[in-house]
């Protein structure tokens, strides 16, 4: 049986308030996030999952004039943008901060 990436369920979800999509760069970054550590992959996936219901949580803030937002998920900032026309949230980048 082929291994399925744990974030592949976020490719497109039509049953939620907003659809979630991940950019290729974000998928590569997610692959580097350690599994099983507190504040690791489970925290990032939980934060990304919550964006479908609430794309502008109080803990997110805008990144300049780029129309992108940043949300902290444990030690990982999640950079995303919201497309109101298609009702989609696109995760653009996930990075580790010390």
Image (cartoon, rainbow, N blue to C red):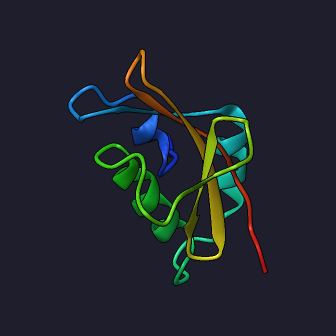
Single out the residue that lies furthest toward the front. Answer: 65
Compared with residue 79, is residue 35 higher up or lower down, i.e. above or below? below
Residue 29 is situated, as x and y percent measured from the top left of the image, at: 71, 52
- Quarter holding the N terminus is top left
- State the residue at coordinates (72%, 35%): 66
- Expressed as whole percent of the image width and height from the top left, the position of residue 86 reads 41, 16
- Considering only vertical position in the picture, is 31 above or below 91? below
Left or right for 23, reference 6: right
On-image quarter of the C terminus: bottom right
Q: Please state the horizontal and vertical placement of residue 47, each as a whole percent of the image.
A: 44, 60
Residue 83 at x, y percent in the picture:
49, 25
35 vs 79, nearest the viewer: 79
Q: Residue furthest left?
A: 15
Q: Residue at x 73, y 38 (%)?
A: 65
Indicate left or right for 54 with 85 as reference. left
Residue drawn at the location 33% of the way across and 49% of the way down: 54
Viewer-proximal residue, 39 or 32? Answer: 39
Quarter location, residue 32? bottom right
Q: Residue at the spot x=46%, y=68% of the render?
A: 42
> Which of the 4 image quadrants contains residue 14?
top left
Q: Look at the picture and state if 22 lies above or below 71.
A: above
Residue 16 or 70: which is nearer the viewer? Answer: 70
Tally of numbered discs: 0
Return the residue found at the far right.
Answer: 98
């Amino acid at each position: 049986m082929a291994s399925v990436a744990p974030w592949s369920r976020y490719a497109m979800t039509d049953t939620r308030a907003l659809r979630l999509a991940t950019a290729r760069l974000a998928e590569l970054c997610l692959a580097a996030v350690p599994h099983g550590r507190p504040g690791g992959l489970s925290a990032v996936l939980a934060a990304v999952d919550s964006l479908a219901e609430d794309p502008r949580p109080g803990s997110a803030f805008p990144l300049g004039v780029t129309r992108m937002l940043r949300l902290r998920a444990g030690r990982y900032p999640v950079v995303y943008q919201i497309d109101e026309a298609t009702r989609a949230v696109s995760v653009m980048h996930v990075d580790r901060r010390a």
